[in-house]
């Protein structure tokens, strides 16, 4: 309990101080030519009044010294070590008990280099720690990229950390209340996404276990809700303080480690609900004489909140991603306030619903109905655990979990669930089922109806209602619709994508990515623009993700419409850009981001950087109709399931392109 209290206190302290983030140092990076191929890099820190940073020379056991890291690049060689130009002031630090060298107001550091090439860029980072009389900032890395040209005269050349034309300028902290309210609305919208609703019954199942006392159940439910808010707010603080960038939430929801952890977590919960074991903490924790609080309940409530937040990322990522873009633009207040607002709205329905188990637990358990609920939820957890495997398989292009296999597993699981509800399968803690009640009957009908609905999916049926949960239709091992399309005699003659979507060259990365609905496209931005110019067509840029539920919904429900599909085939060169793919490119294709100055090495990171830098968002999906230079012709379109509006948007973009490119 004490550790948990300390953890919560730390988070609260962090959130409190984040309202007025302590960040008193700004850095300027420049260089001076000293002779033939001889330069000095100049690092200048401007420090707020009453604050200081530490010298490069700090005794062992002291605070974090200022240090510099230089990337090893072929264009230059370091000459000697980085040295201090400004003379530090040595003062007695009461906290450490000895004298420490510090800088106030301003500090200048230099590093001599010898040029090997005529022009090059020096990249690296400065690490430092700032303090005043009451608080200190965490150790912080500030990256730099200093461009040097041989023709430079003997004078100081300013070279800021971000390149000219950066699309993400630093914003002021004004309008935070409005931004907070927008974030609240975004949080309520997040609850309505298809990945979040299934978590609500799981929450009920969690709070239906354990304590029989209403007070404890209410307390755990409140801890659950507060924890959700703190987790989201902490995410905003972390992104602000570490410059994790707008892709942090996306990385968390698509990386194999968290997905593997939560796949195993769902399996363990399901097995527990089936009655194999109880998830309990040691009895000594529960019976502790000096505590009236169920320690396990508090910790489990926090962990359940963490599970809920991370599981929901695959659907809420586009929403919170737009908020986290603020961090990439240099603003440290908006991500924190945005995440607090989002977390409050997101947690509210869960918290209210989580209070019901305290009432359910007081209902007699005759007939074992409560255990039946847990078993049903165990089957649902097994089904949803497959989503994490699907994310790993699609993001890392493993090609193991096909759509057909995924659907087959679901058919088996929900068939078993139906048989359980009929009393044909019993678990160790189940009571006898002398008859089937009306409610159970309708539940059985619903389950087997769902199973029947799934069966055509084995043969390539789109299953539009479940498109956001299933692997791509292109991964189906047996697609009857494709076979029928090949036999035109069974269909009304229409132009197919093979007849109308003619590509200029073999698409890059077509061994990794596949288009839905038989469409043809490019998966490389520059290659797609070049083909559009050759064919004199506008481009339709589709920013999407392997784990993007709304992307699949748009393709299944909007792109599949015959009128929309015909427009896509005939009028546009389509460029599909996956922002969560982790395929690493060859070194000559790596880029330095214009958003955060970091090197981007994978297909997903490069595409995400393009979306953020050019269109100021990382929301998925995002559709952009653009000219041959990639400039949008009309307003980009996010998720919009209104087919009429989408067709109108496509026609508008085509008309604007034709008006600018007559003939």
Image (cartoon, helix red, strand yellow):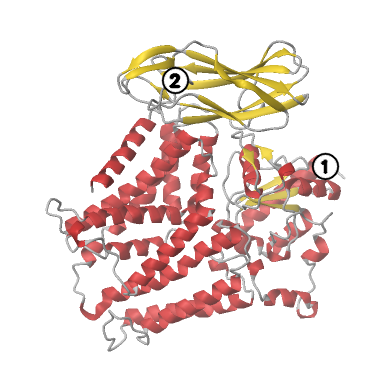
Q: Residue 501's spot in the image, x, y percent? A: 80, 60
Q: Residue 222's spot in the image, x, y percent? A: 26, 51
Mark 1 against mark 2, which lies toward the viewer? 2
Q: Residue 34's spot in the image, x, y percent? A: 70, 12
Secondary structure at badge 1 equals loop
Secondary structure at badge 2 equals strand
Q: Which residue is pictured at 57% across the width and 53% down the height?
A: 639
The residue carrying mark 1 is 661
Q: Quadrant of the C terminus?
A: top right
Using the image, tell me which numbered label, if any, was put on residue 53.
Answer: 2
Depth order, front residue of 494/584: 584
Q: Residue 608's spot in the image, x, y percent? A: 62, 45
Depth order, front residue of 247/50: 50
Left or right: residue 65 compared with residue 82: left
Q: Is residue 395 above or below residue 75?
A: below
Quarter of the rendering containing residue 464: bottom right
Using the image, tell me which numbered label, if any, was put on residue 470.
Answer: none
Left or right: residue 599 compared with residue 127: right
């Amino acid at each position: 309990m004490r550790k948990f209290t300390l953890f919560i206190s730390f988070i609260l302290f962090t959130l409190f101080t984040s309202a007025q983030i302590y960040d008193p140092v700004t850095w300027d990076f420049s260089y001076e030519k000293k002779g033939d191929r001889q330069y000095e890099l100049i690092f200048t820190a401007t420090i707020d009044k009453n604050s200081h940073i530490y010298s490069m020379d700090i005794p062992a056991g002291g605070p974090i010294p200022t240090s510099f890291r230089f990337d090893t690049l072929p264009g230059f060689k370091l000459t000697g070590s980085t040295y201090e130009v400004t003379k530090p002031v040595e003062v007695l630090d009461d906290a450490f008990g000895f004298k420490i060298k510090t800088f106030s107001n301003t500090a200048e550091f230099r590093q001599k280099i010898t040029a090997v090439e005529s022009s090059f860029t020096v990249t690296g980072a400065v690490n430092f720690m700032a303090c005043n009389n009451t608080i200190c900032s965490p150790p912080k890395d500030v990256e730099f990229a200093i461009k040097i040209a041989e023709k430079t005269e003997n004078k100081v050349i300013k070279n800021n950390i971000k390149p000219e034309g950066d699309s993400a300028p630093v914003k002021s902290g004004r309008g935070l209340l409005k931004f907070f309210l927008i974030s609240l609305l975004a949080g309520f919208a997040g609850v309505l996404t298809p990945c979040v609703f299934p978590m609500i019954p799981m929450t009920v199942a969690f709070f239906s276990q354990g304590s029989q006392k209403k007070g404890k159940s209410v307390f755990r439910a409140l801890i659950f809700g507060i924890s959700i808010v703190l987790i989201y707010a902490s995410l905003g603080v972390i992104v602000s303080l570490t410059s994790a960038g707008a892709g942090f939430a996306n990385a968390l929801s698509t990386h194999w480690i968290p997905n593997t952890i939560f796949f195993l977590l769902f399996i363990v919960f399901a097995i527990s609900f089936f009655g194999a074991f109880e998830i309990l903490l040691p009895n000594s924790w529960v019976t502790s004489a000096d505590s009236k609080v169920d320690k396990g309940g508090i910790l489990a409530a926090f962990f359940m909140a963490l599970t809920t937040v991370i599981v929901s990322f695959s659907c809420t990522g586009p929403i919170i991603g737009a908020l986290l873009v603020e961090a990439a633009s240099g603003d440290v207040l908006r991500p924190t306030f945005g995440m607090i607002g989002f977390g409050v709205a997101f947690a509210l329905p869960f918290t209210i619903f989580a209070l019901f188990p305290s009432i359910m637990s007081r209902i007699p358990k005759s007939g074992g109905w409560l255990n039946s609920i847990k078993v049903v939820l165990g089957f649902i957890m097994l089904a949803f655990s497959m989503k994490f495997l699907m994310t790993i398989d699609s993001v890392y292009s493993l090609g193991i979990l096909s759509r057909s296999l995924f659907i087959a597993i679901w058919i088996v699981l929900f068939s078993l669930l139906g048989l359980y509800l009929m009393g044909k399968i019993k678990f160790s803690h189940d009571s006898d089922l002398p008859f089937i009640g009306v409610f159970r009957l309708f539940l059985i009908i619903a389950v087997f109806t769902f199973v029947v609905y799934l069966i055509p999916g084995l043969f390539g049926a789109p299953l539009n209602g479940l498109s956001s949960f299933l692997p791509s239709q292109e991964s189906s091992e047996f697609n009857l619709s494709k076979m029928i399309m090949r036999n035109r005699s069974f269909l009304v003659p229409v132009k197919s994508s093979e007849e109308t979507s003619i590509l200029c060259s073999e698409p890059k990365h077509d061994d990794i990515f596949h288009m839905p609905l038989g469409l043809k496209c490019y998966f490389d931005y520059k290659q797609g623009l070049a083909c559009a110019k050759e064919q004199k067509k506008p481009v339709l840029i589709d920013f999407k993700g392997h784990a993007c539920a709304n992307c699949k919904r748009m393709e299944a429900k909007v792109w599949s419409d015959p009128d929309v599909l015909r427009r896509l085939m005939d009028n546009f060169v389509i460029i599909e850009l996956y922002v969560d793919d982790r395929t690493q490119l060859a070194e000559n294709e790596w880029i330095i981001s214009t958003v955060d100055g970091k090197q981007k090495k994978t297909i997903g990171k490069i595409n995400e950087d393009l979306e953020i830098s050019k269109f100021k968002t990382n929301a998925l999906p995002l559709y952009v109709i653009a000219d041959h230079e990639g400039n949008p012709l009309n307003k980009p379109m996010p998720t919009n399931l209104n087919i009429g509006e989408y067709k109108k948007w496509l026609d508008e973009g085509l008309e604007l392109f034709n008006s600018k490119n007559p003939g």
